[in-house]
């Protein structure tokens, strides 16, 4: 827990979210009270230091250092969240390894973590939809990550109220994978009732949510998984299940409207062949394409690199009268709000494999890297 100090503060109030009301202090966890014998306020004020797991240098052998950092700065449109749980994603290890330095050039030292569930403790002056005490969840925007810590500051537009049905740990498992599924199937894929979608790796973090979302949209869902996870993906709604240890999906599937690709280049090539003419493949595992580079405002050499890197996939798709595109999901509070409604209505449920204590953050990251997790891995921060 963040260190505290007692400040003797006659005639002083502590600002929380642009106001100085003492009830907001109580709601935010900053307790104030009056010493009747001395008739003056004594405020319990947080020191501007938080515990965090910090990346000091890039590299696959680097571990995160348990240490202390300054509390995040809260801008006028920010929500400061006390982190209760943080989801762990393969993206965290890829950033640690330096695989995304060209497009996400974070300067060390910094804190990893792309999923959060927690309680609002302070809001900026321009925030309209949240208040101290609200239970929320979010995927921080790129360049604002850092949920492997006691506090994180988020843009209001990236935050949503936590699904009422879920615990903090369950809620923290949803944002990144939920937004990936939503943006692939709904926003870009425009999946419709009666269409057929092939979702690779159905027992993974994205796959477990995407299967349920696709079924809610009325699609027929095919997926791949191992023998051990067949019952899991069937319980999520998968109609056609290919055991990749026994069968090749390219010989089992055909005439699909949409593929959500999350595997390697060999699987990408085969997946293009299971699409009908006019079908679409959306990849979340690469290669990044020129549209993505343009979208993030990348420098010319990155645009050139993505053009060359994706040339083979784009040419292959065109030759088959299909389309290829790369998706790197974005933070979006409105979409998380819609996902929360589906979760509370019982249409989507989280799948959490393991919950690690905060002090075992490095172990949680290592477990995700094994590729054996069913659904998501979560860190309990408090």
Image (cartoon, grey):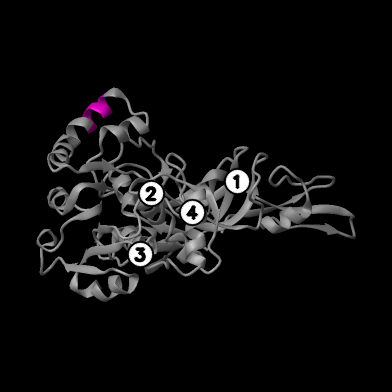
> Compared to 271, does 216 lie above or below?
below
Nearer to the camera, 208 or 46: 208
Q: Secondary structure at mark 4?
A: helix
- The first of marks 4 and 3 along the sequence is 3
Mark 2 neighbour class, 10 Å CA radius: few under 14, some 14 to 19, many 20 or more: some
Mark 4 neighbour class, 10 Å CA radius: few under 14, some 14 to 19, many 20 or more: many
Q: Secondary structure at mark 3?
A: helix
Identify the residue under disc 4: 336
Residue 343 % position (x, y) = 48, 65
Q: Is residue 265 left or right of residue 296?
A: left
Tag of residue 183: 2
Mark 3 to mark 1 CA distance (whole Å): 46 Å
Mark 4 to mark 2 CA distance (whole Å): 11 Å
Q: Quadrant of residue 304?
A: top left
Mark 4 to mark 3 CA distance (whole Å): 18 Å
Name the residue located 24 percent from the left edge and 58 percent from the top edge.
198
Queried whether the magenta region covers residue 245, the answer comes back as: no
Name the residue located 75 percent from the left edge and 53 percent from the top edge.
43
Identify the residue under disc 1: 48
Residue 145 % position (x, y) = 44, 45
What's drawn in magenta, residue-wise?
A: 301-306
- The first of marks 1 and 2 along the sequence is 1
Identify the residue under disc 3: 215
Tags 1 and 2 in contact by the CB under 8 Å rule?
no
Nearer to the camera, 61 or 252: 252
């Amino acid at each position: 827990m963040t260190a505290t100090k007692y400040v003797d503060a006659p005639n002083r109030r502590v600002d929380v979210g642009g106001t100085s009301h003492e009830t907001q202090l109580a709601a935010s966890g900053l307790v104030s009270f009056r010493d009747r014998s001395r008739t003056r306020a004594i405020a319990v004020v947080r020191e501007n230091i938080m515990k965090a797991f910090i990346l000091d240098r890039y590299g696959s052998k680097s571990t995160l250092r348990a240490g202390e950092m300054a509390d995040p700065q809260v801008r006028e449109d920010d929500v400061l969240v006390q982190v209760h749980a943080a989801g762990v994603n393969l993206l965290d290890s890829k950033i640690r390894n330096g695989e995304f330095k060209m497009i996400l050039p974070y300067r060390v030292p910094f804190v990893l973590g792309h999923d959060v569930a927690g309680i609002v403790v302070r809001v900026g002056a321009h925030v309209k939809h949240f208040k101290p005490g609200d239970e929320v969840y979010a995927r921080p925007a790129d360049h604002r990550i850092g949920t492997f810590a006691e506090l994180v500051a988020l843009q209001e537009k990236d935050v949503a109220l936590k699904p009422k049905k879920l615990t903090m740990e369950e809620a923290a498992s949803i944002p990144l994978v939920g937004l990936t599924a939503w943006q692939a199937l709904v926003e870009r894929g425009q999946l419709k009732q009666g269409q057929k979608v092939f979702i690779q790796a159905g027992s993974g973090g994205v796959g477990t949510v995407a299967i349920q979302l696709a079924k809610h949209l009325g699609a027929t869902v095919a997926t791949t998984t191992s023998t051990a996870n067949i019952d899991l993906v069937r319980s999520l709604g998968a109609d056609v299940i290919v055991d990749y240890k026994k069968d090749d999906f390219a010989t089992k599937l055909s005439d699909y409207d949409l593929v959500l690709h999350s595997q390697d280049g060999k699987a990408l090539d085969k997946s293009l062949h299971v699409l009908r003419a006019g079908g679409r493949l959306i990849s979340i595992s690469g290669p990044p394409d020129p549209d993505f580079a343009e979208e993030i405002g990348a420098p010319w050499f990155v645009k050139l690199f993505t053009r060359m890197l994706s040339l083979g996939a784009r040419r292959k798709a065109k030759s088959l009268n299909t389309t290829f595109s790369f998706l790197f999901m974005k933070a979006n509070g409105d979409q998380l709000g819609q996902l929360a409604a589906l979760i509370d209505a019982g249409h989507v449920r989280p799948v959490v494999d393991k919950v690690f204590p905060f002090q075992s953050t490095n172990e949680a990251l290592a477990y995700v890297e094994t590729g054996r997790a069913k659904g998501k891995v979560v860190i309990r921060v408090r």
